Amino acid sequence: MNGPLKNLLVVDLTRVLVGPYCTMILSDLGARVIKIEAPEIGDDSRKFGPFIEEYSAYFMSLNRGKESIALNLKNEEDKKIFDKILSKADILVENFKPGTLEKWGYGWADVSKKYPKLIYASASGFGQTGPLKELPAYDMVVQGMGGLMSVTGQPNSEPTRVGTSIGDITAGLFTAIGINAALYDRQKTGKGMHIDVSMLDCQIAILENAIARYLAKNEIPKPMGSRHPSIAPFEAFKTKDSYIIIAAGNDRLFEKLCELLKIPEINKDPKFSNNSTRAQNIDELKMILEKKLLVRNTDEWIKDMENKKIPCGPIFNIKEAVENPQIDARNMIVKAFHKKIGDFKLAGNPIKMSIYKDEKTRGDIPDLDEHREKILKEFI
């Protein structure tokens, strides 16, 4: 891929999701990514479903455009190969349990002495410091410990996981952000640095309104379904055939909504005349709005609300979301190629840049150790 990170070399010592997601972003932004995998086994996610023939769609969706070489970092000959690659690298990304790479001689303290310009990024469950640093963590663990599951779901429901691996993905995103900031810093100082990202930290960082409410008012937020805790109306409402999302985020939008629903008097009622009072009387307001919304289908309401520029939308399933013409117009479903199964569709890059074309195809999907000869010829 052509992009702002072109000519940068990333050594990818990651597997499964948090690290591969980060290095996929770097690849989409133009970096060359050499993925170091365990011999014979490879990235664990090569065995995760769903499968196309015997190939993991999960793995393919995260590792397009990367090169693969299998190396055992406990083996002296393989370590020599790894050192040759690392000597030319700009960035190393790893998501081993803290302390693992130190045992193999590739901790930050050792590597930074040999390669002072290297940016070394570590993404782990609990980070490189603190009492939990040596414990393993998966997405679901940090969703629970980070408080996210305590505010997700319907009131009085069982604990509910967010429907995507947001613990891994947010850590992957923050790691990519840290790497790009470190690249800018290296331009000024000529030195690399160690980036330490904890999945649990990232969950705390994205709690926004929930953490503000607790720290400011000592309130412990609870699940509220689709409702926003401090903006109203801002949730899903029943219609004749399904649901509609309405996000009337200010008083003017609420006034326009009342006009459209032919209930202008509601906007003048002291209980609903401003956002603060609406939030205090949200249950009563929802009953009033749904009584009107239930007489027509979602599509009909959306058409009218869009004409009035009232923020709204349907609740799509994944098929509907992926096939939305807006998604197609934004090139958010792209193709990569696998030599055995052919073209494979996957999610695109949401970062659009004015001077770089957002291609409809991505780099090929690597088989385990596929690029060994090429890499050895180049680096050894």
Image (cartoon, rainbow, N blue to C red):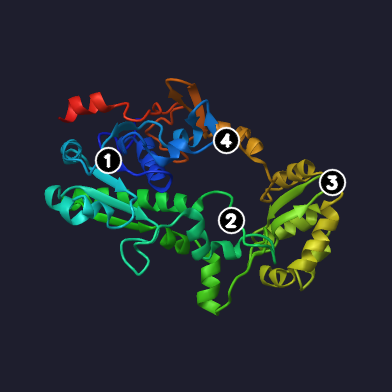
Circle 2: residue type: Arg
Q: Position of residue 142 (x, y in %)?
A: 48, 60
The disc at residue 11 is: 1
Which mark is first along the chain, 1 or 2?
A: 1
Label 4 belongs to which residue? Answer: 327
Rounded to the nearest angstrom, the CA distance separating label 2 from label 4 is: 26 Å
Q: Is residue 354 above or below residue 268?
A: above
Rounded to the nearest angstrom, the CA distance separating label 4 from label 3 is: 27 Å
Q: Position of residue 380 (x, y in %)?
A: 15, 30
Q: At 53% across and 34% down in the image, what residue appears?
A: 330
Which mark is first along the chain, 3 or 1?
A: 1
Q: Secondary structure at mark 1?
A: strand
Which mark is first along the chain, 3 or 4?
A: 3
Q: Is residue 323 above or below residue 143?
A: above
Q: Secondary structure at mark 2?
A: loop
Q: At 80% across and 49% down in the image, what residue appears?
A: 239
